[in-house]
Image (cartoon, helix red, strand yellow):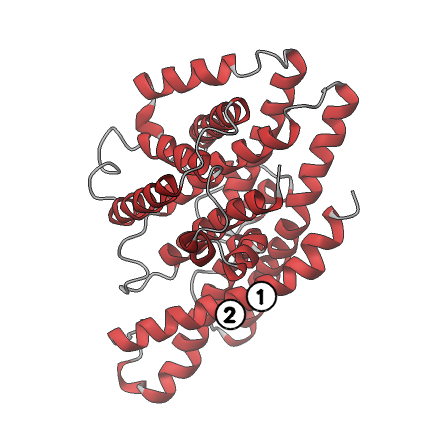
Amino acid sequence: MNKSYLEQLDVFRAIAALSVCAVHFSYDTIFHIYFKQALFVQFFFTLSGFVICLNYHDQEFNISKIKNFMMKRFLRLYPLHLFFLIIFLFVEIIKYLLDINYDFTFNREPFVLNNFSNFFLHLFFFQHYADKYSFNGPAWSISVEMLLYLSFAILFFVNKKYFLTIPIVFVVLFSLFFNDIYGSGYSHNAFFSGFYSFSLGCIFCKIYLNNKKLFASKLYNIFYFILLILFFAELFGYKILFKSNYAFIYSIFFGLIIYLSCFLNKNFLMYKLFFNSWFVYLGKISYSIYLGHVFVFYFLNNFLKYIIYPLINTSDFNNVLKLSVFEAHMYTLAAYLLTIILASFTYRYIETKYYKKI
């Protein structure tokens, strides 16, 4: 497992995280129109399956190993989740104080959607059962991620040699009979949809481990980047497959794209352009980007709506933020910039503070 290969996976994380951001920075800009959030969350699940299988395929799992594995995964995900959960709780408290003292309310009423029931579901890492968009909405996927990690560990413990048997059977059954829940973001369906994508990541990883020298030519590198461009052109449009019963095929494409990237020549020009240090860094902080971008959107949106906009257009102010096309693009670029700045901070002082100790 070489460093350049891991860098490629970091780039895919960056693409997935930034694409989810594009959906939530929800003005009609070129950043928003051609993205579908649920697809890129499934991309994360597929990538996770590939990476976990790659890192642990040669290890033995017993009860002690499972506990250690799950603790590492927990400390990797939970501290940042808890940090943003506390921030959103603090925002609700501020909203409540403004409401009772000044009769001023912005966005929703305090503690209605972000109530204590949803808070405790988030707190105990079952937020995929919480009400949609409560607290830090995108966090639903990381509770599913923890269940996927546990499923992997149990399958490895039961039978390492044939641990892919159940995922392969599940992928076939899901494709034939349950594909209508593909991309589900909440409730038990979120786990089944995630397990499908995660399983495909494991399957493609196993194929890679058995065929590490399958491709090497320059022609292959050219072919791969043409395929990558065509694939993302279709993905960003999402008008054909995603609105049909064949949306589940996207996760197969995700696995294929990840798998084929393993054989790229790092000296190839397109490799250097696409898998550059900037994208690698964004990939490293992608988890912070993913969990932090909604707070940035929330802060920036309300700052413009309740402070800036009334100053420049008070006669039209009715709690609706109105932006021109140019303003909308500047808003989106600012949101991306603030998200990356915040993510750099949380990655350094929260993420790495905990998981590098284990």
Q: Quadrant of the C terminus?
A: top right
Residue 285 place in picture, x, y as percent: 58, 56
* In the image, residue 322 above or below residue 20: below
Residue 54 place in picture, x, y as percent: 59, 31
Looking at this view, is 86 or 195 the one in front? 195
Q: Is residue 334 left or right of residue 69?
A: left
* In the image, residue 103 above or below residue 61: below
Residue found at x 57% / y 38%: 143
The amino acid type found where label 1 is placed reads Leu
Query: Badge 2 local density, few (<14 within 10 Å), some, or many (20+)?
Result: some
The amino acid type found where label 2 is placed reads Leu
Looking at this view, is 284 or 340 the one in front? 284
Query: Marks 2/1: CA distance?
Result: 6 Å
In the rendered structure, find residue 342 and report the number of the disc placed on it.
Answer: 1
Q: Is residue 308 left or right of residue 28?
A: right
Q: Which element is circle 2 on? A: helix
Residue 316 place in picture, x, y as percent: 26, 81
* In the image, residue 188 above or below residue 108: above
Residue 83 place in picture, x, y as percent: 65, 55
Residue 7 showing in the rendered view:
yes
Residue 319 showing in the rendered view:
no
Q: Which element is circle 1 on? A: helix
Mark 2 vs 1: CB contact within 8 A: yes
In the rendered structure, find residue 338 and report the number of the disc placed on it.
Answer: 2
